[in-house]
Amino acid sequence: MINPNSPLARLLAGPLRPGVVAWIGARPVRRGPVEVLEEGLLAAGDGLAGDHYRSRTNGPRQLTLIAAEDLAAIGSFLGRGPVEPELLRRNIVTRGINLGALKGRRARIGSAVIEPTGECHPCSLMEELLGPGGYNAVRGHGGITARVIEGGVVRVGDAVLRIDEA
């Protein structure tokens, strides 16, 4: 635990530019096609309605998020343009906010509140979907997992805001 009065704690609590929801997708079945949505319902303790990864046990992986900037980086590592969100199989793509800076905090996304729970590491499926080198291209750029604390609706274009009290 970081001393709340330390210089590092002050830096971590410093300003964070808000972001925006750029894309939403649900995965109704494992390995099935991703359904692109204009809006989705986030249920507290459960996740995104219609997504097979929802958690009925309040698990840490109720929702997955990735930054559009990471999709561009992954594409660059593979020698191509930005990777399509469907290939990474995340639920929400954000733009303009560093998702890693949400660690230890909560965030409002649309009318819902989420709590980041960890990094979203790549799986071996990335080699199949992105081609040779896909797994290594995603390392460190796979986004985050989160728990839904307060349910609500999230729409493409909604703000993503850090909530300062965790």
Image: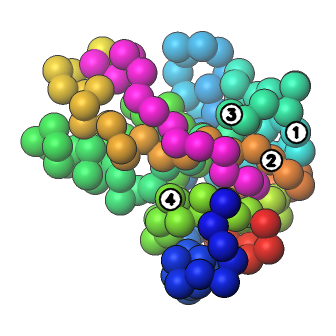
Going by the numbered disc 4, the residue's amino acid type is Gly
Q: Residue at x 87, y 25 (%)?
A: 56
Q: Quadrant of residue 132?
A: top left
- Quick check: 116 above or below 90? below
Report the front residue among 38 and 109.
Answer: 109
Instruction: List the residue tagged with mark 1.
Output: 45
Going by the numbered disc 1, the residue's amino acid type is Gly
Decide which of tag 1 and tag 4 comes sooner along the chain: 1
Q: CA distance from mark 2 to mark 1?
A: 6 Å
Q: Residue 82 at what x, y percent from top left?
A: 27, 49
| Residue contact at pointers 3 and 2, CB within 8 angstroms | no
Instruction: List the residue tagged with mark 2.
Output: 148
Residue 14 part of the magenta-drawn span: no
Instruction: List the residue tagged with mark 4.
Output: 100
Label 3 CA crowd tier, 10 Å (few <14, some 14–19, many 20+) = many
| Residue contact at pointers 2 and 1, CB within 8 angstroms | yes
Q: Quadrant of the C terminus?
A: bottom right
Residue range in magenta is 114-127
Q: CA distance from mark 4 to mark 3?
A: 16 Å
Q: CA distance from mark 1 to mark 4?
A: 22 Å
Q: Residue 1 at what x, y percent from top left?
A: 67, 60
Q: Secondary structure at mark 3?
A: loop
Label 1 CA crowd tier, 10 Å (few <14, some 14–19, many 20+) = some
Query: Foreground mark, 2 or 4?
Result: 4
| Residue contact at pointers 1 and 4, CB within 8 angstroms | no
Going by the numbered disc 3, the residue's amino acid type is Arg
Q: CA distance from mark 1 to mark 3?
A: 10 Å
Decide which of tag 2 and tag 4 comes sooner along the chain: 4
Decide which of tag 1 and tag 3 comes sooner along the chain: 1
Q: Secondary structure at mark 4?
A: helix
Decide which of tag 4 and tag 3 comes sooner along the chain: 3
